[in-house]
Image (spheres, rainbow, N blue to C red):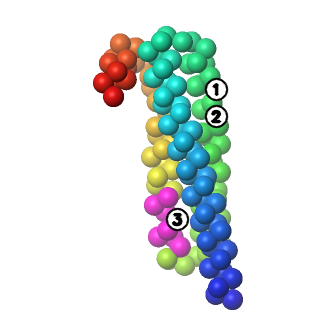
Amino acid sequence: MFARKRKLLDIDRQDLIRLVTEMGRLAAQQITHTLDALAKRNMALAAQVIDRDAILDTFQANIGGKASDIIARHPAIAIAREVIPQYRLLTTLSASAILPKISANASSSSIVKIYRST
């Protein structure tokens, strides 16, 4: 019985890690595309960045739901210790997803300077 529960937990945890990793990859792409759009004053790319923000919002909701489901199915303290840091990573990544919205209000020259210094 315990081995079966542990296997189910491992599957859930791997699914959560996969979702967080994919969201991180998409968030990194969004940041790169945002900086490119600002540096090149590419309005079409900027519009794509804004449109893709909904995908990150969906990832955030899915990951939050998955983390809640894991905690509900596996209420042991040890499980919460594994899931909560991954959920915190999600919220950190999702905060970076608002960069396009913030950048739209920032001066493009200041963003371009940051982009070129990296």
First to last magenta residue range: 79-86
Q: Residues within 10 Å of mark 3 (few under 14, many from 20)?
A: some
> Are the two marked residues, 2 and 3, in contact with CB atoms closer than 8 angstroms?
no
Q: Does the magenta portion include 84? A: yes
Q: Residues within 10 Å of mark 2 (few under 14, many from 20)?
A: few
| Residue assigned mark 1 | 51
Q: State the image quarter where residue 51 is shown.
A: top right
Distance of label 2 from label 1 (alpha carbons): 6 Å
Which structural element holds mark 3? helix
Q: Amino acid at mark 2?
A: Ala
Q: Position of residue 89 (x, y in %)?
A: 46, 52
Q: Residues within 10 Å of mark 1 (few under 14, many from 20)?
A: few
Q: Position of residue 27 (x, y in %)?
A: 53, 38
Q: Locate the N terminus by quadrant.
A: bottom right
Residue occupying image coordinates x 66% and y 80% = 5
Q: Is residue 80 visible?
A: yes
> Are the two marked residues, 2 and 1, in contact with CB atoms closer than 8 angstroms?
yes
Residue occupying image coordinates x 57% and y 58% = 17
Which structural element holds mark 2? helix
| Residue assigned mark 3 | 83
Q: Which mark is residue 54?
A: 2
Q: Which mark is residue 60?
A: none
40 versus 95 height, above or below: above
> With 89 as the anchor, is 58 left or right in this view?
right
Q: Locate the C terminus by quadrant.
A: top left
20 versus 68 height, above or below: above
Please give the count of numbered marks on the rendered protein: 3
Q: Which one is in front, 68 or 100?
A: 100
> With 78 as the anchor, is 45 left or right in this view?
right
Q: Amino acid at mark 3?
A: Val
Residue occupying image coordinates x 49% and y 76% = 78
Q: Amino acid at mark 1?
A: Asp
